[in-house]
Image (tube, rainbow, N blue to C red):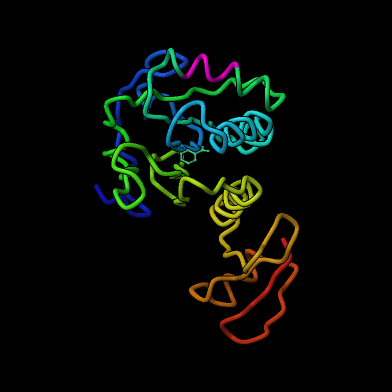
Amino acid sequence: MTLRLGDTAPDFTAESTKGTIHFHDWIGDSWAFLFSHPADFTPVCTTEMGRTAQLADQFERRCVKPIGLSTETPESHLKWIEDVNDTQNCALDFPILADADFNIAKLYDMIHPGESETAAVRSVFIIDPDKRIRLTMTYPMTVGRNFDEILRAIDALQTSDNRTCALPADWKEGDEVIIPPSIPNERASELFPNGWEELRPYLRMAKL
Ligand code: BEZ
């Protein structure tokens, strides 16, 4: 199934390392970071699981619940978590979905036959509290994801939602934002009372 930005994230019920997960209920009023892995006990995946665990407070600060997925059983995941904690110096406490029958991997188009017929690629879905897919990324099996970018993208999405703005290339918290061209100057004055710099009529930069 092809999923696009703005689509409702498909709901599912599945077993995990934290018991049965009813996905939409589990997300609740939070955001979700759903990320898939080719297999348990593999090196790149181990570092990604560890990094997510190390960043638990960063995800929590943004009201984002991480949830991993690998196409193996809960028992295998639980054994693997012991290795993740040992080797990555962390205490992994988020659920890992057990998708041994590939139900979720197929639902979310995580199987890319050009990479592998039998394992999920490294997909990322950032899902908002309305259960809409707001951002996706797809990495191949051999390349670990950049978690600074994942957090930056979440910050950008939440800032865009909360402050009616767009974010320029390489934006990070504290940088200037863009006043979207759809907002006339009169409305922009209300949203950005400290003013803005107009580089072009379509390119207005403001401090938050
Ligand atoms: C890894 O996580 O290291 C990995 C998994 C599957 C294929 C290649 C690398």
Task: Tell me the quarter of the picture where residue 75 sits.
Answer: top left
Please determine whether, in this image, residue 175 is positioned above or below residue 148: below
Per the rendered image, the range of residues in magenta is 77-82
Q: Residue furthest bottom?
A: 200
**Number of on-image labels:** 0
Spot occupied by residue 185 in the image (x, y as percentages of width and height): 59, 77
Please determine whether, in this image, residue 206 is positioned above or below residue 24: below
Q: Main secondary structure of the magenta part?
A: helix
Relative to 71, 137 lies left or right: right
Residue in the image at 27% along x and 51% along y: 2
Q: Quadrant of the C terminus?
A: bottom right
Task: Tell me the quarter of the picture where residue 167 sits.
Answer: bottom right
Task: Tell me the quarter of the picture where residue 129 sits.
Answer: top left
Q: Nearer the viewer, residue 6 or 3?
A: 3
Tell me, yes or no, if residue 125 can be seen here: no
Spot occupied by residue 76 in the image (x, y as percentages of width and height): 44, 17
Q: Nearer the viewer, residue 119 or 108?
A: 119
Residue in the image at 62% along x and 68% along y: 168
Q: Nearer the viewer, residue 74 or 118?
A: 118
Residue in the image at 54% along x and 71% along y: 180
Please determine whether, in this image, residue 15 is positioned above or below residue 71: above
Q: Please tell me whether residue 184 belongs to the stretch shown in magenta.
A: no
Q: Residue furthest left?
A: 1
Tell me, yes or no, if residue 89 can be seen here: yes
Spot occupied by residue 18 in the image (x, y as percentages of width and height): 47, 15
Residue in the image at 55% along x and 53% along y: 157
Spot occupied by residue 54 in the image (x, y as percentages of width and height): 68, 30
Please determine whether, in this image, residue 192 is positioned above or below residue 87: below
